[in-house]
Amino acid sequence: MTTMAQETVTAAAVTAAAVSEAAVTQATVEAAGVPQTASTVRRHELAAFLRHRREHIAPEQVGLPRGTRRRTPGLRREEVAQLAAVGVTWYTWLEQARDIQVSVQVLDALARTLFLDGSERSHLFQLAGAIDPRPATSCAVVTPALQSMLDQLDPIPACLQNSRYDILAYNRTYGMLLCDLDAVPPEDRNCLILSYTHEEWQSSIVHLEKSQRLMAARFRGSMADHLADPTWKTLLKRLRTSPEFCEVWDRHEVMGASPRRKEFRNTHVGRITVDHTDLWLGPARGPRMVTYAPADGESRERLEKLHKIAQAR
């Protein structure tokens, strides 16, 4: 990984670097018959994004005089490089979609220099194929419309979860499927946490060990995108206080999302068989709506009975 000190170069090299810019544009690459790999496409998207943001920042916004000889809309490349404390040639190469590696420190500096908001910053790091070291400060918002969708799915159990298995919202039937979820403190409403610490939740899952392994494997796969996020690290630290979780975690199993059948042993209505489906609200490994459709007539009747019990509470 290149450091900011290594990336700092003299401005004298800018002219030579700029001369070759035409040779690395998207059109030229395609004309030359170079395969358009995901990496190539991502580099060109990154270059276009940086150029667009640079051209839409007025010099006055960063304390620079506009002058009378400025022909570039927005900031010049060398001005962005100076403000971000990176090499001019290095930044030029980024806008030329050169196949170079860039450090997270440089990406962070560019995000601040170009006044990127949270979504734009995330986009920048994704295009660069890097992990943002800044702690995540936002989470999925449960809108009234989403809660209404959950409620209208009753008596089918449904909830909103993020990729950490935090339960963000749920309908009445889900709230009584595995335990009395309303009685669980909000900070403990996490499927992984509950599967290792909550006795009623554990006893309600017929194939508990299999479920724990699947969740740990999916959690590991999702965490690869959040290795520097303190929220994820805190959750993992809490989970590792359980010897049972450590045994499963140390297997280093990884698994993606897939529909599957589950069996629950509900305290109020007995055994229920359901088909689990994830309905994604955004990119994969992001927030999702989890639904448990009854797999047979008996399970449907028992879910309807459970819903009536929940309504009467």
Image (cartoon, rainbow, N blue to C red):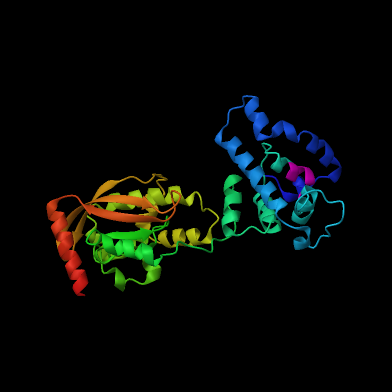
| Residue 46, percent from left and from top | 63, 44
132 within the magenta span: no
Q: Is residue 73 above or below residue 32?
A: below
Closer to us: 232 or 174? 174
Q: Is residue 272 left or right of residue 126?
A: left
Q: Please state the extent of the stretch shown in magenta in the rendering.
A: 86-92
Q: Is residue 271 left or right of residue 248?
A: left
Majority SS type along the magenta span: helix
Closer to us: 143 or 203? 143
Report the number of numbered marks.
0
Q: Is residue 17 left or right of residue 309?
A: right
The residue lying furthest to the bottom in this view is: 313
Closer to us: 143 or 242? 143
Q: Is residue 205 visible?
A: yes
The residue positioned 41% from the left and 60% from the top of the image is 239
| Residue 229, percent from left and from top | 53, 58
